[in-house]
Image (spheres, coloured by chain):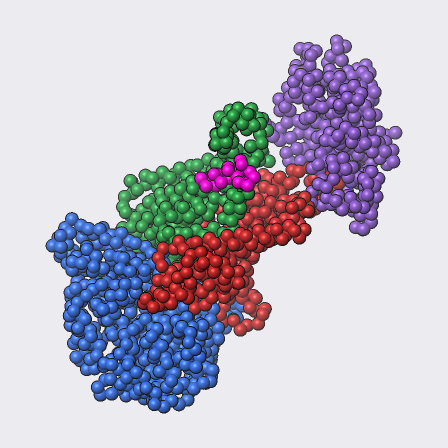
Amino acid sequence: MNTSFLLRRLGYGLLLMLGVVVLNFLLIRLAPGDPALVIAGEMGGATQEMLDSIREEYGLNKPVAVQLLLYIGNVLQGDLGESFFFNQPVSSLIAQRVLPTILLVITAQVLSIVIGVVLGVLAARKPNGVMSAFVSVFATIGYAVPVFWTGIMLVILFASIFPIFPVEGMQSVKLRDASGLVKALDILHHLVLPAFTLAVIYLAQYARLSRASMLEVLGSDYIRTARAKGASPRSVLFKHALRNAALPILTVAGLQFGNLISGALLVETVFNWPGMGRLAFESILRRDYPTIMGVLFFASGMVVVANILTDMSYRLADPRLRGKG
Amino acid sequence: MNSLLEIEDLRVTFNTRYGEVTALDSVSLHVKEGETLGVVGESGCGKSITALSVMGLIPTPPGRIAEGAIRLNGEDLTQASEKRMQALRGGEMAMIFQEPMTSLNPVFTVGDQIAEAIMLHQKVDAAQARRDAVALLDRVGIPSPDVRAGDFPHQLSGGMRQRVMIAMAVSCRPKVLIADEPTTALDVTVQAQIFDLLNEIQREFGSAIILITHDMGAISEMADRVAVMYAGRVIEEARADDVLDYPQHPYARGLISCIPALGKDAGGAGDMLAEIPGVVPPLHKLGAGCAFADRCAHQAPRCAVDKPLLAAHGHHPVACHGVEEGWL
Amino acid sequence: MNCMSRLMGAAAGAALSVAFSVAALPVFADGGTLVLGSTQTPRHLNGAVQSGIATAVPSTQIFASLLRYDESWQPQPYLAKSWEMAEDGLSLTLQLVDNATFHDGAPVTSADVAFSIETIKENHPFKTMFAPVSEIETPDPHTVIIHLSKPHPALLLALSPALAPVLPKHLFDDGQDMKSHPLNSLPVGSGPFMVEEFTAGEAIVLKRNPNFFLEGRPKLDEIIIKIVPDTSSLLIAMENGEADIFPFMQGSQNIRRLQKAENLDVTSEGYAAVGPINWLAFNTQSPKLSDVRVRQAIAYAVDRDFITKALHRGVSAQQRGPIIESSPYFDDSIPAYDVDLDKANALMAEAGFGDGMALTIDYIPGPNEQQLNLAEYMKSQLKKIGIDITVRAAPDFPTWAGRVGGHDFEMSMDIVFNWGDPVIGVHRSYLSDNIRKGVIWSNTQQYASDKVDALLDAAAVELDEDKRRALYGEFQQIVAGDLPVYWINALPYHTSYDKRLQNAPTGIWGTMHPMDQVSWGE
Amino acid sequence: MRDQDTNFQAESPALEAWRMFRRNIPALIGVAMLSLIILATLYGSFFYGGDPFDIVWAPQEPPGMTPEFPLGTDYLGRDLVAGLLTGGGPTLAVGAAAAAITMGIGISMGALAGYYGGWVDNLLMRVTEFFQVLPALLFAMVLVTLFSPSLFTIAMAIGLVSWPQTARLTRAEFLKIKQLEYVTAARAIGARNKRIIWKVILPNALPPLIVSATLTVGVAILFEAGLSFLGLGDPNVMSWGLMIGSNREYILDAWWPVTFPGLAIFFTVFSVSLIGDGLNDAFNPKLRER
């Protein structure tokens, strides 16, 4: 891994983020209606003095270009503005919500990749077998089911009819003072349904992808070479083939991250998960633009970071890319 | 001396959407220790299937060995368990493939790939296997082998990669070494080096080599005996000199006439097609008669209905009615 | 659902997680945690500068106020141990308790009270509460004299915990804007509970105030307000014991569902002071609706009976006038507009719309059963008198508020609270001087009647209860004829709570009242 | 392996693909299912009358209880069958329109980037990457909120957030095809860039794009459903997503008003993706043989 690549990649990521900041700003400008009126409405009244003081406070009375520069400057300092709704800075609202989202998204990602790849590999072993047919059908079904619908059905089944899993968010409020292990178990307990719901769609895609990828790799010359030197079927499958088949899976996993965050938005809403997605959704209902834009900014940042990590791990996994620019 | 490897009446079939087709039919071959058997023929004639059958690498399904036996030191490989085959592959017998570009795993270093082959068959630890791998790289003529061992395949040239393949194949001193078109993808000069290397290895290890090629030049350089294959059958078999000097089968004659004059470019498939009109018929369209009949300039009525068998006529065994009946 | 499956589920659940079985352990007697589930998200916790139930519930636990109210609308001592209204009704003198302290240990003094009332007068959207307050005198640390420019009978109710929290002057009076003061999110008060944690949009953790000035209270160790925006999830949480009390529940399905739960009690008590009215508002300035006959025709077409019985499944009560029917000021002789389609069609023809007309209807996004469903019902029902309705959706509350507040609407469903005294919650919708463009829940109908203005102004200062009632009676007769809005029903607010809960909050202010006597029973 | 000549005879690969497609049973099932769904949404309301917004019966009548309302009624007492039949049209229309917008933007961007290369490619690809960084659903929600929900804004928003993948695919195809001999030949006879892009390269890049377009329709339908579920659908037009969104609150009491539209969406997307897979196999016979 060379540092210049990493630096270039990071610099480019920052550029993308700057783009998001500008877009954010433009979107707020495009919003119909006077932001000051919206804020005043939330505060419960709109006298002229109040509107003026709000304009002053949020810098709405300055020229647009100045506002943009101010906004960029603030974002660079980690200041995403004040929420229109909550009496708090957007950055602290997001800070409270980041970890749950990351926990949910990463768990779902890991679940879907691990289960998906195992299914895909098993299917690839016998391209015409039962497993293979199952993976194909399952992948198409998984792709076609609306994720929120799966979530609702799971809530009905496992929270209402058979109350096995809780639905009240990420942890049981009554256990907030509990010890670390109990708390961890509690969070795990809450995590099962949302993570599984989110994982299902991507799981199906990974299964399908890894099946195709494995089939391609298994037909390649170096697999024949591995067999010719006497490697066992297991070693051929998991050592020689999977390492190569993992490359496209890795690419898709990176590209999938943005979609995963979108999916998390729906899943968080269904399961009351205290993450950024729900914050964004509720903020949209409240027209809390600074918070919406803050989440959009932060979520994009997560995608950028995920892309950089993917690129880096791709270069680690594929020696052919190492040392290239 | 007895044959080290003996293939007897081998019939291999494949299930395709045209039904079951026979890819190899009544193939019998043998090779002795220290001997080089050349197997020649156009693409699709069954050379590679033969090699893969020996290695037990026929993709099953759709392929299967329907009849016959393959004996290595008297042990019938068609009856051997998968476990046993794993032990034999890379140990007792090894194979060098046609495409050095794609036959090495791109994500492992060449040193690791050779070391893996060593560890699969010899009871040595990783460090020792690594040292052996470097020694092998040195043996196959790779400069600064200790550095090269840490390279990935994409960092090596084609010739280097084929040397790596050879190093990997001979790492456990195989008794039988199958080289499937080992030089097709390489430059002419590199080809010669690779053949030299194979010859050296054979002298050193006493291996039997089965050299599969469509290049008659390679045969003349390397082979002690030659089997000519066409459409899944051996149609002529003899000492290399005999086949080269007195080809009997019209197809063999065609092949021989393709050998370029010395110093010219080694013959490619394109030249060959120019000499023999038509192409190898698809396996599912093989009729009852001689598979070569449609392309044969000397076709007789019998050729279309009656499949000629391999039998000694004159110099050496050949499967042709014309030769058998003496009108050719 | 049958018992067996529930049992199996519970068993599987217990087996699945240690955490689950810990959560299921019962809690007994004094102390313990109360988990209050709320579907509404508070902006912050300071009820002095923010109206609405989302803020009022935590605010009344954190802040004490001068008075509190019992079940029969009678004022009771709280921070004020005694009070006296002057004969002329122009001043109120209150004596504060001696032992009250804020959570940071500072004593509660008359200066804090004066600061709080001024802050509320300045910042709270309910301008009428303290508008007549001309001066606040603090002769000593424990005496407060509120001077009024005119008699103000609603003043006592306005001193309730839900409306007039007493703020610590030494913390809040630092020159910052009160509406966005940083302490609003983690306030210090003198109420029975102290804020330990406030996760915006998630949870508010309130811990027992050990130095609360009322002896032996509060009983609970902890109140956790858990915000669950999705009602279905909150219902499941209630059934599974993850939450203990769910106030302001209004969906008929939800109410009926929890009524069936064996571990829960459900009551409609606790909302008398709120007086939540669901109504159909008319923009009286729009050309099509300026004719009172059209509004009356619509009133005759809409079937309150069908709405409350069929659409609301009998959980909501009909509401015929501007003052909630459970209030002593309600006049039940006002016209009811029982459904009469012939009369409605005749009125339409009379108004010159015999060939029909097209109207739009807006609704508050969120409480669908009260709002969207009724808008959809209007669409279906008013077709019968030739009115073609387009339902205008608002994607979110601010959009709706912008339209209605900006007078950019024809008809809209709306929910408006009485907030105890008519002066606070009723006058604002009918006074012509409260037509304030851009302000939601002002007189957005732009209804103007000199007669009504005069009646309301008189009622606001009338100290004699009977006379006051008569003034409000006349007011109700007039607006019921003019129909700036067509009142439909009282919101079916219900509270569901764990059966083991003692002294559940069912007073006139319900959970917008200090829950210092609530406890877990044996 | 198809040789260069066949590229000049456009019917031949298309016919070949059709032959492959015709033999693909799952794809044919997909076609049958989708045709049925489209027919039902186009003509169903002629046979099964009634405004889907009309309140016709008691709310939340379970399916199978009343013969007139075989699938029951929703939370307002509106007929679910009428809703399903009428709601399919807008859902499919939004899906198709969004897919068309996606393909329009994506193909244009990808074609220009792939054909011209250099700074054009660089610029357009940066823009593409920028749009890929924005979480699609979140961005679409913001757009729909800003411009108020209607079928048009929803389709636009979905199109605006979905095109980057199409752009990448188109670019890759263009990069591959522009090096082929017949493109050079076209250039040699003096064809203009515009002609080469749209008349020479694009037709040859179509097979993967057609597959992608098919799958995009499915994604767009799911997208619309997701937005409606979050309450950002168009409330004046009955769509499957709206049915789910507005009945979601009552899901614990009545499963059917949410389940049936959910199934309708599922079967539509399922059939569309079966067709997409079938087309993919048909255009890439090599992959199929494996």
Residue at horizontal 63 percent and vertical 48 percent from the top: A314
Which chain is assigned red?
Answer: A
C513 sits left or right of B89 in the view: left
Q: Position of residue A103 (x, y in %)?
A: 55, 60
Which image quadrant for residue C476? Answer: bottom left
The quarter of the rendered structure image containing the C terminus of chain D is top right
Which range is magenta? D103-121
**What secondary structure is the stretch in magenta mostly built from?**
helix
Q: Position of residue A58 (x, y in %)?
A: 42, 64
Q: Position of residue D126 (x, y in %)?
A: 53, 46
Residue at horizontal 50 percent and vertical 38 percent from the top: D112
Which chain is assigned blue?
Answer: C
Q: Classify C110 as above or below A226.
A: below
C157 sits left or right of D161 in the view: left
Work out whether residue A95 or residue A76 is closer to the camera in this orientation and state it: A76
Work out whether residue C146 or residue A257 is closer to the camera in this orientation and state it: C146
Work out whether residue A263 or residue A78 is closer to the camera in this orientation and state it: A78
The answer to whether residue D112 is magenta is yes
Give the colour in which the image draws chain B. Answer: purple
The answer to whether residue D15 is magenta is no
Which image quadrant for residue C348? Answer: bottom left
Q: Classify C225 as above or below A128.
A: below
Is any atom of residue D290 visible in this view?
Answer: yes
C44 sits left or right of B287 in the view: left
Which image quadrant for residue C227? Answer: bottom left
Give the colour in which the image draws chain D. Answer: green
Residue at horizontal 51 percent and vertical 46 percent from the top: D127
Q: Residue furthest top?
A: B327
Is any atom of residue C24 visible in this view?
Answer: no
Residue at horizontal 82 percent and vertical 25 percent from the top: B221
Q: Classify C134 as above or below A81.
A: below
The quarter of the rendered structure image containing the N terminus of chain D is top right
